[in-house]
Amino acid sequence: MQIFRTVLGDVPAEESGRILTHEHLLYGYPGAELDHRTAFDHPAAVERVSGQIIDGMIPNGYNTLIDMTPAEVGRHPQFMVDVARRTGINVVAITGFFPERMGVPYYWRRQTIEELTEFFVRDLTEGMVFAWQQTPYKAGAIKIATGQESVLPKPSPVGAYGRHVHEVEDRLIRAAGKAAMETGCGINTHIDPMDFEVTNPGREQLEILDEVGMDLSKVIIGHAFVPPQVAMMREILKMGANVQLDHIGIPWRVGSAEELDEAMANALIELIEDGYLDRIVLSFDRWFFNPRATVTESDPQLENEKVNLNYMFTSWVPRLKSKGVTDEQLDQIMIHNPRRILSIAV
């Protein structure tokens, strides 16, 4: 039997509906939770996020959301549970950390591969820990992340084993692969588009997972279309992994949403024509709620917070259909592919 391990318990995979594979219900850069200016009213925030889901996800047939928020970037098990109860959608939490330059608290940088593996497995099988307290709410997938992104983004330097991967990130990726094999869960990843200038970051992540024996068909390389790197995506797909098309309606490192959407749509058509329809998933990478201090030049309000969830079917899907994509192909990408990759056999 295949299931999704949600924060409210295991759910049969066939009840997934459409699936958003990379979203953030509550998001804050590491340390934001300590700021007086970011304190928020929990019930009001749950109601705010739930309203967005009820208005934009449920009418469009989405019933499952993978909350890709890492442990140190605002992952809040009770918040996810309360939203899931309020809306009725399946919320899947992840275990994992952000890139080393932006996250991975000092405590975890000192841990061995074996200790990190145990942490991931316990999050997936016992429940996540929050604010020093054990919760019964389990993660259902693992996130790995690489990249040099910071206040002043730049490509990653050469690090561990000759790759553009920091030493701690390398350890975390190896632990994630071991934990995924032990539990049967899928892995979704974060890469930084700046790294396309110096390497294929998705391939480097996959090489490390392959070295520990991970089944690469259970891995999604996130942000692979930002902006589209078709040759690099073909390299990833030939290794047996999957690619995620995200930032729909959200310009990131690109001039406008229109420019990025059109480029991503054309790249998607190329990959479908290449025979990779069954290896692609879709998501926004939307921040549903980002408690923050004042907006400044170094901490701007990003487009991830602004895109309307209905945009998928008012703009993106019509764009694809105008290029010949069929309803059956859309179902493959929005339902069947993520269901296969992220469900767990029990």
Image: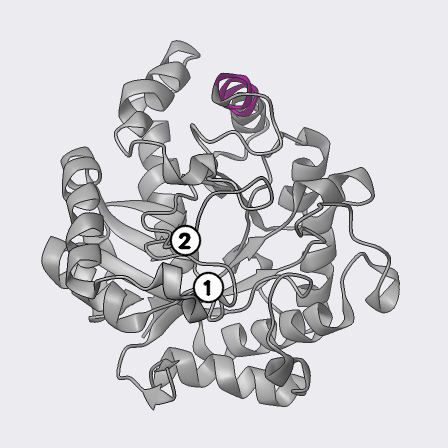
Q: Of helix, strand and loop, which one carries label 2?
A: loop
Quadrant in which the C terminus is drawn? bottom left
Q: Does any portion of residue 213 appear in the rendered image?
A: no
Residue lying farthest top? 322
Residue 246 image label: none
Measured as percent of width and height from the top left, residue 9 is found at 22, 73
Give the residue at x 72% y 53%. Answer: 148
* Front-lying residue, 27 or 326: 27
Q: What amino acid is labelled 2 in the image? A: Arg
- Give the labeled residue for mark 1: 32
The secondary element bearing badge 1 is classed as helix
Q: Residue at x 48, y 34 (%)?
A: 277
Determine if the magenta segment contains residue 261.
yes
- The residue sitting at 54% across, 25% down in the picture is 264
Please say whether residue 185 is one of the residues in the magenta stretch: no
Residue at the spot of label 2: 292
Closer to the camera, 153 or 240?
A: 153
Marks 2 and 1 close (CB-CB < 8 Å):
yes
Which residues are drawn in magenta?
Answer: 258-266
Q: Position of residue 182 (x, y in %)?
A: 50, 80
Residue 324 x %, y %: 41, 13
What secondary structure predominates along the stretch shown in magenta?
helix
Q: Amino acid at mark 1?
A: Ala
